[in-house]
Image: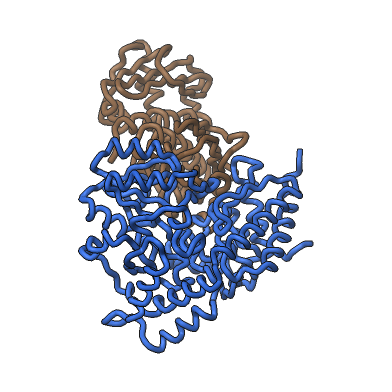
Amino acid sequence: MSFKINKYPQSRALFERAEKVIPSGVYGHLGPAEGCMIPVSAYPLFCQKAKGSHFWDVDGNEFIDYMCAYGPNVLGYCDEDVDAAVAAQMKISNCTTSPPGLMVDLAELLVDTVASADWAFFAKNGGDTTTLAIMTARAATHRKKIIFINGFYHGVAPWTQKVDYPGVLEEDVANNLYIDWNDFDALEKVVAENEGEIAAYIATPYMHGNFIDNQLPAEGYWQKVRKLCTEKGIVLIVDDVRCGWRLDLKGSDHFYGFEADLICFCKALANGWSVSALCGKDSLKNVVSGITYTGSYWMSAVPFAAAIACINKMKALDAPALFRKRGTMLTDGLKAAAANNGFNLVVSGEPALFYLRLADDNSLMLHQQWIAECVKRGVFMTNHHNHFINAALSEEDVKKTIEIAEDAFKAVRKNNPVA
Amino acid sequence: MVDQKTLAYINMYAVLGTLENLCELVPEASALLAGKKPISIGFDVKGGPSATLTFKNGKCRMEQGVKSCDIKLPFGSCEKFNGLIDGTVTPIPSKGFTHIGFLLKEFTSLTDILTRYMRPAPEALEDKDFFIASTSLMFYTISVAISQIANNDKVGRFTADHMVDGDVAFSIKGGPSATIRVNNHRLVTIKCAPASPRAVMEFSSIELARDLFDGKVNAVASIGAGTIEMKGMISMLDNLNRLLDRVALYLA
């Protein structure tokens, strides 16, 4: 089967306008540079509308979306139940002088849902919560140093960046220590070398770095980390901004059989409405109370209403089970389509957040070609990042995706014949 | 902050090393060497780099070390050597007094020409040939400086520590090419295109390259505009960009 090849004249025209008034046209992960759109000409640059698991660009091209706005779209774009809650709340209040009662409702819902949560603190972006988590750990321990996993991403605040990033000072990252994922010996060593100085260990539930196969936790890794952190008085922070709600509604720490001291949520919390939450153990609640940390929109009612509706719907659907089923069906089909055309597609990470890599060259150039051919045919994926599934993704979507992927593989094979 | 040792390595291999390309690209430079007997100058920097420039048949070639040179210029420190490049230090040979004429005449003329091309007057760039040669020379200087920063500068070494092995093709479409080779977090620049790059960064035109070198346009914006092509192991290019960012610190 052959598919229409997308063209993007309106996207390009809009981008040319954007370049004049916005730094780099579209900055950040949704932009062509950081979004690794290779080649740029294969990708849409602006969205016109979205519904369910699909979006349409400004040229009218339709895409089955496997990035889900890089995570927030967990139930499907414009989900009726979430948006009904939003519409209802918009008639009542949003950003007000006194916070809405909904804030308490949402905190109670989180405490009742997330296994390791005794309280919830709300903000807007994932980075707001990772920063608060680090401040909390330092305030609680009166220590400076933080252990990171190489290849980490915990937001864009200076402490989350690296010394060679523009605008970052050596002093911003002077207390950052780096070890490799799943290397418990390295963790023990760095803890011993910095005895009494480490405030926190922060990591995602598993390693989902870019450009490399994602790695699940080794057997017993998290349990050993938990034990060591407890023994040494180190605050264990799980950055669940990306995985949160897709693996386990009780938290990804629960999914992997341990309890974090602090756990950060954002992305899937409210199906695209802007709210994030830091949840934590009772022992740290008073510490957080003493930290000066707030924002103009952090207690707005509408996103709280969206989050409550979203969590309740994810529970009703058993969304993590659905994601596992759909993700497995999809990735099995993609691997088969690759094999049919003589390619070796490696799938890593959890099925709900699968990472793909064509292993036929070590430069990722073939992989980039294949992803570009998929995008041109209406399946939006990226070549550098893990993907996301939402609950609106149907079996028909998956089947069509596999057909498009197969056609894309044929195009890549045609351009790269077997020698 | 500029590190004097890193600057010395850049001055040696990226700045003086560009004399190789100057003699290829600028007839006025190669003409200075025409009909002259081969001659070599060794630069020996205590606590820093050492290299020999050999001038032969109108061409120039740089090699590491000062084992066999006609004129030897010792420098007591990286700062002293950097002073030679910025014109505040006059070198005193320890060997080759009979060849001092070449040092004072031809070599000085060559470095003057290089300076004219590397720091051109705006009106000079209106000449197309000059523009192409000047931008190509800048390209080679920057390409080599990237590796020196990665190997010597504190922040550059941090960047190199995050780079995987392989060749990066760094080029201007229809113009000069270089290989930035990464091996065990050490970088070396080779002034020709790689056979099997693991990552590619290509500027679409020499005009774009010039604007990027002059800081008039931004690389991230150019990727979006499609005027910089990148592909392959993008993490290598991310890190290359961080090194490029530091080139300006040293060569501005």
Please report the residue visible at 37 percent of the width from the left and 15 percent of the height from the top: B71
Please report the residue visible at 47 percent of the width from the left and 39 percent of the height from the top: B163
Chain whose colour in the figure is blue: A
Chain B's colour? brown
Tell me if B213 is positioned left or right of A340 in this view. left
* Colour option used: by chain
Residue B36 seen from this side: yes
Q: Give the camera-side residue of A175 and A205.
A: A205
> Looking at the figure, which quarter contains the C terminus of chain A?
top right
Tell me if A281 is positioned left or right of A38 in this view. left
Image position, residue A283 (x, y; %)? 26, 59
Please report the residue visible at 53 percent of the width from the left and 20 percent of the height from the top: B57
Count of picture labels: 0
Q: Give the camera-side residue of A357 and B149.
A: A357
Where is residue A80, by image quadrant? bottom right
Where is residue B245, by image quadrant? top left
Image position, residue A33 (x, y; %)? 50, 55
Please report the residue visible at 52 percent of the width from the left and 57 percent of the height from the top: A35
